[in-house]
Image (cartoon, rainbow, N blue to C red):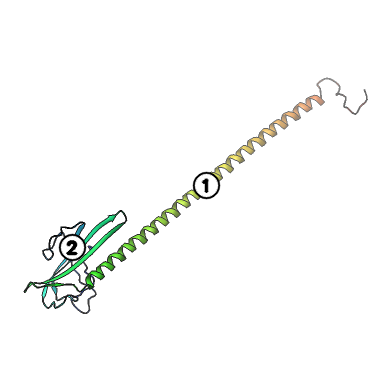
Amino acid sequence: MNNGIIQGSKEFNKDQYIEKATAATSSPLFPEWKGPGKVYYKVRASVLAPMHFKDSNDEGTLAVRYVVESKDASKSILRIDAVFVEDFRRTVHPSDGSVESAESQEIQNQIEEVETEKKQSEQSEKQRLEKLAGQELERKRVQEEASALAAARTSAQTLDQHLDSLLHQAERVVKAPGGNPLPSAAQPV
């Protein structure tokens, strides 16, 4: 709302909208709002006969009032009113509805843009978390494989040591020091 632009009207044919509007907390062009909701204003002084305000033929002030009333956490009602008041004759010219429609459409477009950005951000965050989870799973898999490899190496070393020990014991049995070799099972006694 506070972008300095009033949609749906223009001063000159080459314009797309009215620029240089300022945000305001109130406007004497509207009666004080006593209803529910929060009220915002955009005001542009020194506007030259803006389009879509019937019989506006002078320089004056254009004001747009936005009333936002929350219905619940996810729904709000937006009411938009626009008037042009001539400086010289102080004649009030209500909008023919073009300003209200265009401003409403612009707000809707901005809401959709924010929602799209939010969805994209959520999707990016989800992808980032999935990537981190995948990296963590890969790290754990590599760590488990390294642990399994280390355990296998330790087991192989233990088996090699055990085999070496058994070979030494077998050598002692076969070559008893200072004596005759032990009879084998194939020789008669």
Q: In this view, does 104 lie to the left or right of 188?
A: left
**Residue 154: % across, % down:** 63, 35
Q: Is residue 107 left or right of residue 34?
A: right
Residue drawn where x is 28% and y is 68% of the image? 105
**Residue 76: % across, % down:** 28, 58
* Mark found first going from the N terminus, 2 or 1: 2
Element on which disc 2 rests: strand
Density class for disc 1 (Cα within 10 Å; few <14, some 14-19, many ≥20) is: few
Residue holding disc 1: 137
Res 69 → quadrant: bottom left
Q: Where, quadrant-wise, is the C terminus in this rendering? A: top right
Amino acid type assigned to the residue bearing label 1 in the image: Leu
Instruction: Give the residue at the far bottom of this rendering.
Output: 13
User: Which of pointers 2 and 1 indicates the residue nearer the eye?
Assistant: 2
Residue drawn where x is 23% and y is 64% of the image? 79
Res 104 → quadrant: bottom left
Amino acid type assigned to the residue bearing label 2 in the image: Tyr
- Comparing 9 with 148, the one in front is 9
In 3D space, how far apart are the residues under numbered discs 2 and 1 (Cα atoms)?
A: 54 Å
Badges 2 and 1: C-beta atoms under 8 Å apart?
no
Q: Compared with residue 137, is residue 17 higher up or lower down, i.e. above or below?
A: below
Instruction: Give the residue at the far top of this rendering.
Output: 178
Q: Which mark is residue 41?
A: 2
Instruction: Give the residue at the far left of this rendering.
Output: 88
- Comparing 35 with 121, the one in front is 35
**Residue 124: % across, % down:** 42, 56
Element on which disc 1 rests: helix
Density class for disc 2 (Cα within 10 Å; few <14, some 14-19, many ≥20) is: many
Q: Where, quadrant-wise, is the N terminus in this rendering? A: bottom left
- Comparing 39 with 88, the one in front is 39
Residue drawn where x is 76% and y is 26% of the image? 169
Q: In this view, does 163 lie to the left or right of 131?
A: right
